[in-house]
Image (cartoon, rainbow, N blue to C red):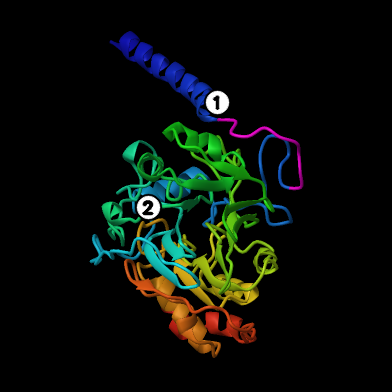
Amino acid sequence: MLKIVGGVLLLLVILFGLVVTIVPRFLDRVYYKGPPSDHFDGERFHNPGPDDDTFRPPTGGSRAGFFWRYLTKRDGRPPWPERVAVTPSRPPARVEGERMLVTWVGHATVLVQTAGLNILTDPVWSDRTGPWGLGPRRVAEPGIRFDDLPKIDLVLLSHNHYDHMDLPTLQRLWDRDRPRIVTSLGNDSVIAQTGAAATALDWGGRVAVHPGVEVIVQRVHHWGSRWFTDRNRALWSGFVVRLPSGGNLFFSGDTGFGEGEWPRKAAAYGPIRLAILPIGAFRFMPGQMEIGSHMGPVEAVQVFDRTGAGMALPVHWGTFRLSFEGYDTPPKMLAALMRCTGSDPARFAGHGIGVAFEPPPVTAPRAPLDLSRLDACARSEEVRALP
């Protein structure tokens, strides 16, 4: 019996060794080949500047231990609702001219209708985000039913994380509409698994997508991976959509603050009518206010100020549970910070999932926000009391 048990244990050890040796290499992928640059070393991409590490465990200890506590819900996180009621919107077929109609579908998915174009950001209609149907489940249904979507002309795809690059949704969109998909380097090879074609550009690359409409791929501060071992094989980005009138659209994708210069680069292409900015998944331990790879409300206020945008839509919260903060902590904290700094909270148009709104055209430059009290506001009792 002891020999049998010993043999089984030896076999398990051998199998484990094979798995840890072979599987990571099998799961690694080379998505892009090209010359080195200030953000590509010939094999992997990185954020320029001193704050490149966007993935260190925020609570200390090992990365594996952190994820184990998170996945087993043993990190003391505040409760979230199982489901949140959503009344889906039914958008029109088109919105012509200078008028802009915007509907938050959920997470980072937004439908923007303007200049006769239907634009969709990081489209996700799946119930879960993760490989093999695993991963966080939606607590809020999409704000537009897929069958009620108008014909999509343009998809802006920021990076290859599962909660932003949802291959089943991309395949449905491609089969139905054949939209123009614009993304950053390397992501086109992943998207091609669906049979869809994508235009993949480096930061600063631009492409005309409609008469008078141009998309510029914009530097932000993040990382990319589908399997961890393929970390940063593909590039991450935001997008400026230059429009004929009324001001531009800026979609930051998923991003941390970094050194904070990229919002000004987006503003350099012309006045921004609407900035779509993330405010959630910033807390991985009680009281944490920032993380390298994601912006929280404090940093979102700074980014909004630096873009000079007339209005901002806060996204990346309240759809999939990805972090420690309470369900509605991000918008509550954002509103408290805007009030505390003397800014108009309505400039962040948090109308809710499925609620369409119309950002007004930019007619004059917006005055900078007074952020001299932002640090003090972030330490206020109202803000610190939010879970």
Check if mark 2's residue and mark 1's residue have beta carbons within 8 Å: no
Q: Is residue 311 shown left or right of residue 129? A: right
> Where's residue 42, x and y in %?
72, 35
The secondary structure type at the circle numbered 2 is loop
Res 131 quadrant in image = top left
Q: Main secondary structure of the magenta part?
A: loop
Residue at the image point whose x is 45% and y is 22% from the top: 16
Res 242 quadrant in image = bottom right
Residue 33 on the magenta span = yes
* Residue carrying label 1: 25
Q: Earlier in the sequence, mark 2 or mark 1?
A: 1
In the foreground, 126 or 222: 126
In the foreground, 122 or 248: 248
Can the viewer see residue 10 in this picture?
yes
What number is the disc on residue 143?
none
In the foreground, 238 or 133: 238
Residue at the image point whose x is 56% and y is 35% from the top: 230
Can the viewer see residue 292 in this picture?
no
> Where's residue 134, x and y in %?
33, 41
* Residue carrying label 2: 151
> Where's residue 32, x and y in %?
63, 34
Amino acid type of the residue tagged 2 in the rendering: Lys
Res 171 quadrant in image = top left
Q: Magenta part of the protein: which range?
A: 29-38
Amino acid type of the residue tagged 1 in the rendering: Arg
In the foreground, 10 or 193: 193
